[in-house]
Image (cartoon, helix red, strand yellow):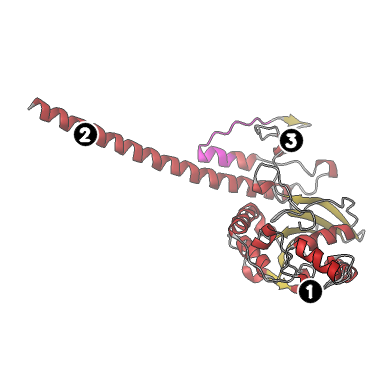
Amino acid sequence: MSGHVAQSGFGAEQQDLKTEIEASIRVLFNIVANLRFLCHKIISEISHARTRVSGCPPKQRDYYYVAVSAGILYNSKVLLSFKFEQFNHRIIPLRNLVSTTDNSITTPIMELNTNPEKTRFFFIRHGQTDHNKAKILQGHLDTSLNEEGQLQAKTIGSAVSPFLASIDHIYSSDLQRCQQTTAAIVAHEGYSAKDVTYDSKFRERFMGEIQGMHVDQAVEYAEAQGKSHYKEFGELPHAFNDRILKLIEELKHVKGKNIIVVSHGGFIRALLKNLGFQNTDFIVYNTSVTAVEFDHQSGKFEILKVGDTSHLGEGEFKVADYRVR
């Protein structure tokens, strides 16, 4: 009898333990869900706060009001370990309040323009393709994203989503790899796919008969054809440059304060060079964000940042062959 009772008691303890574990798992899932929601709301509210202080003097434009975000923290009953410090009776920029293990500065992938006299363009390169990985020249080949590229597209989509409501329009190359990246961006709440313009003028340079060749094969083919460089096939560099210059003139007349353009690495590099960017060895990584602003009063462009990959996380990005980036 006593043995039977002991066995029943042990079974009851197992059941109680199972119930506690299941309850704990449900709590953990709820915490994760709340944290995701919290992060989204904080970024959104900070963006709105920055809009409200857009009239501040230039040196203070970067100051964030975070009172609303503090309310979100309280209501969500989530405790985060960062300190609020005062400087000249104003709250210092939030990026200086966030503690990270390597003391790096954390900033949003996009900092929106609120000045109606300016238009800020966010150029986003498409996600990775198998041709990118294998160093095969794509040009106008209509390649699609590989598994890594799809993940990159989803990641940039999530990073951009808090700012979509303030984006006036999205332009994209009509090639599939850009369309897929754009689709991952507009899939998030806050934007309509009807506000996207797909246009061939945002395409990569046309490479003619060497499209689909590995870069080494293209070099050998160019030598065999008596060419000094494989770029002498297809859309010649000066013609490509003329296309970029024409597009720059068109960008000056685009309406809206914040615009996204999803395009290609070669396109974005050529654009930056024509706007006076001096670094000739820079890399525009897959789904990186480059910000350029046009001042309608001065008629001048300003390069704000190049190739931001902060949404992809920590780590060093390397390119195996600089001929194909």
- Which quadrant of the structure image shows residue 72? top right
Q: Give 89 or 128, whichever is nearer the viewer.
A: 128
Q: What element does badge 3 sit on?
A: loop
Decide if residue 257 is in sight here: no
Which numbered mark, 2 or 1, is in the foreground of this view? 1
**Circle 1 residue:** 208
The three-letter code of the residue at mark 2 reads Ala
Which numbered mark, 2 or 3, is in the foreground of this view? 2
* Label 2: how many Cα within 10 Å (few below 14, some 14–19, many 20+): few
Report if the CB atoms under discs 2 and 1 are less than 8 Å apart.
no
**Image point 30% across, 34% down: which residue?**
17
Report if the CB atoms under discs 1 and 3 are less than 8 Å apart.
no
Q: Position of residue 273 (x, y in %)?
A: 88, 58
The three-letter code of the residue at mark 3 reads Ile
Q: Position of residue 65 (x, y in %)?
A: 69, 41
**Circle 3 residue:** 92
**Circle 2 residue:** 12
Q: Earlier in the sequence, mark 2 or mark 1?
A: 2
Q: What element does badge 2 sit on?
A: helix
Q: Give 153 or 157, whichever is nearer the viewer.
A: 153
| Residue 316 badge | none
Q: Position of residue 177 (x, y in %)?
A: 66, 66
Residue that extends furthest to the right in the rendered view of this protein:
298
Q: Earlier in the sequence, mark 2 or mark 3?
A: 2
Which numbered mark, 1 or 3, is in the foreground of this view? 1
Magenta residues, start to end: 71-84
